[in-house]
């Protein structure tokens, strides 16, 4: 009897201990909150916090939505009376600009320099040229190309702490290739400022994550128009993951698809890479770099990513025979797992 009691004490203790652990896990799991809203012309924005009560999370979500709306009004060229929209409507001379717009332009300029002009937020006249070509269903002619190219170039934009000047008439700014990342980072900062210790903000597959531990982030399938279809899953620590690809937005001329990303030097749509996923310390820089690499193509893109120790990349190269090759930064190889159906092994670089 005594022996039985003696034996059962550790068993009971173990059971109680296990119940505490399981209870703890359930409580932890209970605190994962998720909510979403739509922004930036129809992009679903998903907000996740891992350590929140439901009441506080509702307020977090509202605060994030408010911040996204505030920045969207400032950065979007689609917003009537937005700062960038007003600037583009003028298209000449100098205007007063807010510190946040000037700060983001400063970051855009840094990527313009790092990418040797491949990333250029003044590319709008060339984008408009290709949109007009789509409407006419005819390739743009040389004269029209030269006229548009003359109004493109970050070297023709001057800005100080308060003002922004175009050196040529008819210039415009499109922050679409960097502002989504900046908005994700700002949203993550709002959550952190409110005391969320671990969470993420996801805008259509582009993510800013913060806090301790690992995050599993889905990388979109570049050959599917279904946003939910994945090519693989990337395990990351806090930072940003952004994918640029030609699967969602493109122009069609004479039955041929062209990327919405334009090479500012040649004036032609980017070619060769079906998608570029960049992982980095924040979403702003990952966004800009993903677009830059899309323009630069495989070899120059790989060289640029390799030269930046804080960044890694996964690229899907489209071959002429319609096959494809996946390239992956050496350091990301153990962290990237392809979903089934993607049998080929990525080539490390
Ligand atoms: P990315 O590669 O990140 O960006 C591609 C975009 O960058 C192109 O669409 C073009 O605008 C620009 N670009 C092209 N070539 C270059 C280059 N060489 N260097 C720099 N930039 C280049 N879409 C709507 O349809 N309606 C909206 O109202 C709307 N509002 C938006 C508001 C905000 C604040 C943002 C950030 C985006 C908004 N968008 C909207 C989406 C936007 O138009 C772009 O499609 C989107 O930002 C592109 O992101 P991406 O991830 O597809 O590609
Ligand atoms: Mg981008």
Image (cartoon, helix red, strand yellow):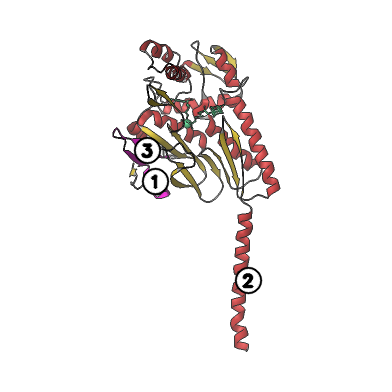
Sequence order check, earlier mark of 3 and 1: 3
Q: Is residue 132 magenta?
A: no
- State whether residue 245 is above or below residue 144: below
Where the C terminus falls, by quadrant? top left
Q: Residues within 10 Å of mark 3 (few under 14, many from 20)?
A: many
- Tell me if mark 1 has few (under 14), some (14-19) or many (20+) residues whose alpha carbon lies within 10 angstroms of its own: some
- Would you name the residue on which mark 1 appears? 331
Res 304 seen here? no
Q: Residue 319 versus residue 281: which sits nearer the camera?
A: 319
Give the distance between the C-alpha atoms of the residues marked 2 and 3, in whole angstroms: 51 Å
Provide the residue span drawn in magenta. Answer: 312-337
Residue extending farthest to the right is 55
Q: Which labelled disc corresponds to residue 316?
A: 3
- What residue lies at 41% left-to-right and 21% top-to-bottom? 264
Determine whether the residue tagged by mark 1 lies in a helix, strand or loop.
helix
> Which mark is in front, 2 or 3?
3
**3 vs 1, front mark:** 3
Whichever of callouts 2 and 3 sits on the residue coming sooner in the sequence is 2
Where residue 244 appears, x then y in whole percent?
Answer: 45, 33
Q: Spatial distance from mark 3 to mark 1, Cα to Cα?
A: 17 Å
Please tell me the numbered disc located at residue 16: 2
Total tally of numbered discs in the picture: 3
User: Residue 70 in the image: x percent, y percent?
Assistant: 64, 29
């Amino acid at each position: 009897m005594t022996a039985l009691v003696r034996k059962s004490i550790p068993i009971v203790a173990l059971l109680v201990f296990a119940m505490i652990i399981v209870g703890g896990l359930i409580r932890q799991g209970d605190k994962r909150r998720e909510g979403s809203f739509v922004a930036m012309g129809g992009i679903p924005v998903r907000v996740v916090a891992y350590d929140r009560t439901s009441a506080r999370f509702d307020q977090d979500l509202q605060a994030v939505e408010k911040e996204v709306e505030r920045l969207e009004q400032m950065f979007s060229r689609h917003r009537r009376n937005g700062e960038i929209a007003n600037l583009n409507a003028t298209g000449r001379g100098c205007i007063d600009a807010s510190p946040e717009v000037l700060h983001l332009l400063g970051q855009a300029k840094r990527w313009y320099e790092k990418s040797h002009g491949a990333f250029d937020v003044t590319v709008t006249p060339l984008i408009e040229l290709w949109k007009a070509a789509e409407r006419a269903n005819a390739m743009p002619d040389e004269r029209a190309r030269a006229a548009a190219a003359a109004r493109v170039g970050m070297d023709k934009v001057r800005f100080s702490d308060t003002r922004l000047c175009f050196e040529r008439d008819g210039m415009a700014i499109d922050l679409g290739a960097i502002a989504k990342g900046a908005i994700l980072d700002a949203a993550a900062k709002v959550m952190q400022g409110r005391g969320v210790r671990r969470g993420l903000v996801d805008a259509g597959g582009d993510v800013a994550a913060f806090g301790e531990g690992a995050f599993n982030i889905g990388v979109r399938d570049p050959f599917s128009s279904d946003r939910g279809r994945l090519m693989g899953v990337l395990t990351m620590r806090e930072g940003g993951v952004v994918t640029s690809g030609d699967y969602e937005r493109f122009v069609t001329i004479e039955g041929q698809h062209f990327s919405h990303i334009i090479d500012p030097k040649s004036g032609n749509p980017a070619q060769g890479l079906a998608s570029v996923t960049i992982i980095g310390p924040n979403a702003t820089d990952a966004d800009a770099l993903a677009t830059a690499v899309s323009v630069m193509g495989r070899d120059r893109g790989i060289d640029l990513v390799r030269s930046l120790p804080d960044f890694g990349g996964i690229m899907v190269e489209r071959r002429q025979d319609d096959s494809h090759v996946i390239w992956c930064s050496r350091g990301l190889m153990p962290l990237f797992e392809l979903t089934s159906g993607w049998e080929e092994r990525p080539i490390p670089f």
